[in-house]
Image: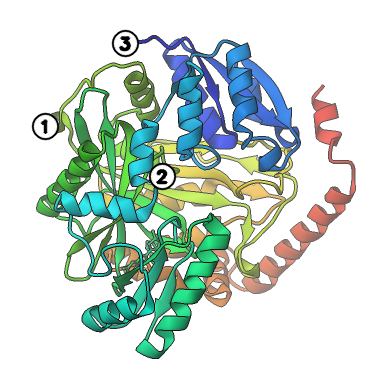
């Protein structure tokens, strides 16, 4: 059934709110921002046609207030809500409430979200569709004897995973039988307190796997296509750092098989709108189903770059009840795209969030460069939310050209006032194992140390200042820290006053 959308409320903040607003504008759709007190001066609030303060900075008093958000949408007569990622985006109860209030939820239907929301039911459906599964328990572990039998069959090391977990939360590695019982008990009680669900299952531990995910798009008439894969193995403690599309490790044939598995899974649960099916790929190029992410993902731009599609526009058209305007055969991969996540974290201090004021913030420019961000020079980075301040995306004719372009773009990105992960990303991009494509999810743990990063930075400076590089770098670092501390002690509102 076709419905027009004239006004969208964006139930999110930062770069993704701005990202959605931009596409809506291009479609002639009005936009509504909701914002917390910490975000009152944020660009996404100004970019929207209307904006409403929702509450104090903490998420549970602002961006997570489902009922309040729906009330605002009803009051301002928004036809639809886009949830972005994080916050309420994968909450089936929220999607259902939105729909019951007569508002279009720009995302999958609540019924499909429930069927793939917990990992055990997602795995059950995937198995029924003949998606390759890593060996392990069929369902939740009921007792220790059963667990021992399975462990005996599949061998060690193995992983205990929480069905309600995700993104590495509630995972436990077990190396030998003697550890099994205690690990299961712990995993169950942790899962219960973290997710309110103690269901855990066992999987054989895949060593040195790659993390590959397939983007899917489906309409409300049962048409589903795959928009190829993203390589997401470069991550640190389950936080993705660099993503790219396509993956240099995936052949045409494997791409097709993985894509078709993702599509079959989506069709089996009546999934529509955008979604992602995650897989592990082992060193023998076997792939295994992991989980489904029922949302638009942070790294969706790399898929946009190689397909030429605007995923947010596609999401909106699907939500309006339009059929997909292309088939699988119409889709082609064009060039190569890489994204780095620029986070306000200090790589020299265990990636601790580094808040403060963006004293200088100059974006890179030029051919094939895209910056999706949510802050401007002079703004304070709030402590309350994810430390990601920008996504830097490049698109070039092939992988090597994309790497070169990304390094150039990183060098051009000038951020002063806070520490960021930019230099860390450059370290990865210059690493021989990254360049050769021979890397897995263990890359960062294996190669990264602050000392290595320091060496790289020194080498960089040496190109310019042959002799004093070390001293120069330390000096700049200390100067910035001192300057930052000094400024933070002053009134943080200075900048806004000056603007007026
Ligand atoms: C695994 C695995 C090895 N074997 N499952 C981590 C996040 C969650 N989505 C699944 N994860 C993993 N599951 C089996 N059977 C290794 C990981 C894993 C990982 C996966 C994707 C990206 C980064 C990772 C880092 C460490 C472990």
Q: Alpha carbon of mark 2 to alpha carbon of mark 1: how far?
A: 24 Å
Pointer 1: what residue?
329
Mark 1 vs mark 3: which is more N-terminal?
A: 3
Q: Is residue 389 above or below residue 328?
A: below
| Whole-percent x, y for residue 441 in the image | 37, 66
Q: Alpha carbon of mark 3 to alpha carbon of mark 2: how far?
A: 29 Å
Instruction: Look at the image and tell me whether residue 178 can be seen.
Output: yes
| Protein image colouring | rainbow
> Mark number for residue 175?
none
Mark 2 vs mark 1: which is more N-terminal?
A: 2
Quadrant including the C terminus: top right
Q: Is residue 326 above or below residue 261?
A: above
Badge 1 crowding class, 10 Å Cα cut-off, few under 14, some 14 to 19, many 20 or more, is few
Instruction: Look at the image and tell me whether residue 231 can be seen.
Output: no
Mark 3 vs mark 2: which is more N-terminal?
A: 3
Element under disc 2:
loop
Element under disc 3:
loop
| Residue drawn at point x = 69 percent, y = 56 percent | 354
> Mark number for residue 299?
2
The nearer-to-camera label among 1 and 3 is 3
| Disc 2 to disc 1: CB gap under 8 Å | no
Pointer 3: what residue?
2
């Amino acid at each position: 059934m076709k419905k027009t959308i004239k006004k969208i409320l964006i139930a999110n903040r930062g770069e993704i709110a701005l990202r959605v607003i931009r596409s809506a504008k291009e479609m002639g759709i009005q936009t509504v921002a909701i914002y917390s007190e910490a975000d009152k001066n944020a660009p996404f609030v100004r970019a929207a046609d209307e904006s409403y303060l929702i509450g104090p900075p903490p998420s549970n008093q602002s961006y997570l207030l489902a009922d309040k958000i729906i009330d605002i949408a009803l009051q301002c007569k928004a036809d639809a809500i886009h949830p972005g990622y994080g916050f309420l985006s994968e909450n089936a109860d929220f999607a259902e409430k939105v729909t019951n209030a007569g508002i279009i939820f720009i995302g999958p239907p609540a019924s499909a979200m429930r069927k793939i929301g917990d990992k055990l039911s997602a795995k059950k459906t995937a198995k029924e569709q003949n998606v390759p599964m890593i060996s392990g328990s069929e369902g939740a572990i009921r007792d220790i004897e059963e667990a021992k039998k399975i462990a005996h069959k599949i061998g060690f090391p193995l992983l205990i995973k929480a069905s309600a977990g995700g993104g590495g939360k509630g995972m436990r590695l077990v190396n030998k039988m003697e550890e099994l019982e205690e690990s299961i008990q712990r995993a169950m009680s942790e899962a219960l307190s973290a997710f309110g669900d103690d269901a855990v299952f066992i999987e054989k531990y895949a060593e040195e796997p790659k993390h590959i995910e397939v983007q899917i798009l489906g309409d409300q008439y049962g048409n589903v296509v795959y928009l190829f894969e993203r390589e997401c193995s470069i991550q640190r403690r389950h936080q993705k750092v660099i993503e790219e599309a396509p993956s240099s490790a995936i052949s045409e044939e494997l791409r097709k098989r993985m894509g078709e598995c993702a599509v079959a899974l989506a069709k089996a649960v009546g999934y529509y709108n955008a979604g992602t099916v995650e897989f592990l790929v082992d060193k023998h190029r076997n792939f295994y189903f992991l989980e489904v992410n029922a949302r638009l993902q942070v790294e969706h731009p790399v898929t946009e770059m190689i397909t030429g599609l605007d995923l947010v526009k596609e999401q909106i058209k699907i939500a309006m009840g339009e059929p997909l305007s292309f088939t699988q055969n119409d889709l082609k991969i064009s060039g190569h795209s890489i994204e780095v996540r620029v986070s306000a974290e200090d790589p020299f201090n265990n990636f601790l969030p580094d808040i403060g004021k963006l004293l200088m913030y100059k974006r890179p420019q030029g051919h094939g460069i895209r910056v999706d961000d949510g802050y401007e020079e002079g703004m304070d980075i709030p402590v309350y939310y994810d430390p990601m301040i920008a996504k830097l995306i490049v698109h070039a004719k092939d992988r090597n050209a994309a790497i070169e372009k990304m390094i150039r773009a990183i060098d051009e990105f000038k951020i002063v006032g806070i520490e960021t992960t930019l230099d860390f990303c450059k370290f990865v991009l210059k690493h021989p194992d990254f360049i050769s494509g021979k890397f897995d999810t263990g890359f960062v743990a294996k190669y990264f140390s602050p000392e290595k990063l320091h060496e790289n930075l020194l080498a960089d400076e040496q190109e310019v200042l042959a002799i004093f590089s070390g001293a120069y770098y330390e000096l700049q670092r200390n100067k910035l820290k001192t300057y930052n501390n000094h400024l933070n002690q002053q009134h943080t509102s200075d900048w806004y006053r000056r603007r007026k």
